[in-house]
Every structure is written in C-alpha cells, then in structure tokens.
Image (cartoon, helix red, strand yellow):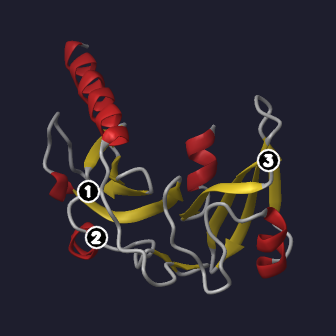
C-alpha cells in the first residue's frame, strides 16, 4: 500500500511538472494527416522511433502499470503501452514502453492539415472535410463542450470542441478514447 502511495505521488509530481515545461515541436509543414499520422507519428509506432523523430519528451508519466504518457510541452501527448509481462517500478525504465496507442494534440500545437484544419478550427470546417461524425457526445458538466468521433482506417479520430472551436484532436486505436473517458 505504501508503495502505491509513493508511485501515485511521483506520478502526480511528474504530471504537474509536464504542464510547466515548454518543449518545441517543428511545425513548419502540414502535420495532421487524418487517418494516418499526427506530427509524423502513427499508431503502433515503436517508442524508439517516436523519440528519434521528436526527441526526448519534456516529461513522462506511467499509469496503471499498463502504459505511459509522454508530454511534449503543452501541445502533444503520446500514449504508449508496456511490453507484455513488463513491470514498471517508480522511476522505471522508459524503454519498457513500446507501441503508440494514442496521439493527442492540444493548446499550442500549430500544425494543420493540408485543408488548414487544426486547433482553433471550427466544427463546420471539419464536417466539410470529413463529413458527419459517427458519434457526437455533449459534456454533461460543460454544455460548451462537444466531442465528435470519426472512424478512419479502422481507428478513432476525436475532435473536442469548446464553443464550436477545436481545443483537442486525438487519434487512437478503437475504443481507447472510450476506455479513457469512462
């Protein structure tokens, strides 16, 4: 029990630290290709490729002993899973994390699609580009928020809007978003 408290305390500290670090991402070219990649990273990419492409994250966080989140400033979050059979100790080896299961952009990410869709774009632009979403859900606690879900190449693409403008885009293997919001 004491070990869980220590791990939780360390995880919270790392998460808080991640929010205050400003790690720059090269955003000179279109970096969102719906159904394929965000910032050159695709679902299933090995962690080593992510680090080679983006560099070391500004911070990281292990959760539920099943995976980790790698933060690149306040604009990009990469979620990975652990190798089967691996156990992660507090301050554990980042090399135990492997494939990418979720890529999320938010806040200061300025990359866009070839059509110019990105953080700050409005919902009608997304619908004009991708059609109507498979599912839309309203936030019961905040009526200004709405999430649209699309299935592209067998994976989920979600847009979180606040007052009709995109504040976050997440690309995940099926049901990853649903599991993380329940």
Query: Pointer 3: residues within 10 angstroms few (<14), some, or many (20+)?
Result: few
Residue under the point 26% across and 47% down: 59
Disc 2: which residue: 54
In this rendering, is residue 14 above or below 52? above
Label 1 element class: loop
Q: Nearer the viewer, mark 1 or mark 3?
A: 3
Work out whether mark 3 precedes mark 2 in sequence or the reverse, and give the earlier one. 2
| Label 2: how many Cα within 10 Å (few below 14, some 14–19, many 20+) | some
Q: Which residue is mark 1?
A: 57
Q: Nearer the viewer, mark 3 or mark 2?
A: 3
Q: Nearer the viewer, residue 175 or 104?
A: 104
Q: Where 34 sits versus 12, above or below?
A: below
Q: Is residue 86 left or right of residue 169?
A: left
Image marks 2 and 1: residues in contact by CB distance under 8 Å = yes
Image side of residue 165 versus residue 46, left or right: right
Q: In the rendered view, does 171 fall on the left or right side of 132? A: left
**Are dots 3 and 2 in contact, CB under 8 Å?**
no
**Quadrant where the C terminus lies?**
top right
Front-most of 131 and 178? 131
Quadrant of res 144: top right
Q: CA distance from mark 1 to mark 3?
A: 31 Å
Q: Earlier in the sequence, mark 1 or mark 3?
A: 1
- From mark 3 to mark 2, how far is it between C-alphas? 31 Å
In the structure shown, which secondary structural element does the residue marked by tag 3 occupy? loop
Query: Which x, y percent locates residue 118?
Result: 62, 69
């Amino acid at each position: 029990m004491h070990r869980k408290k220590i791990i939780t305390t360390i995880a919270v500290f790392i998460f808080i630290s991640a929010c205050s670090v400003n790690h720059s991402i090269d955003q000179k070219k279109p970096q969102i290709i719906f159904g394929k990649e965000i910032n050159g990273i695709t679902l299933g990419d090995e962690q080593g490729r992510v680090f080679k492409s983006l560099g070391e994250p500004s911070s990281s966080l292990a959760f539920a002993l099943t995976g980790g989140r790698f933060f690149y400033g306040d604009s990009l979050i990469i979620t990975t899973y652990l190798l089967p059979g691996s156990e992660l100790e507090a301050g554990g080896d980042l090399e135990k994390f492997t494939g990418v299961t979720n890529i999320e952009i938010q806040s200061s990410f300025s990359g866009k699609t070839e059509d110019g869709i990105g953080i700050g774009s409005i919902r009608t632009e997304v619908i004009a580009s991708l059609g109507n979403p498979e599912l839309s859900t309203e936030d019961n606690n905040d009526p200004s928020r709405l999430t649209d879900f699309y299935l592209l190449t067998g994976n989920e693409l979600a847009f979180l809007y606040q007052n009709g403008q995109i504040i976050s885009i997440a690309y995940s293997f099926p049901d990853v978003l649903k599991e993380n919001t329940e």
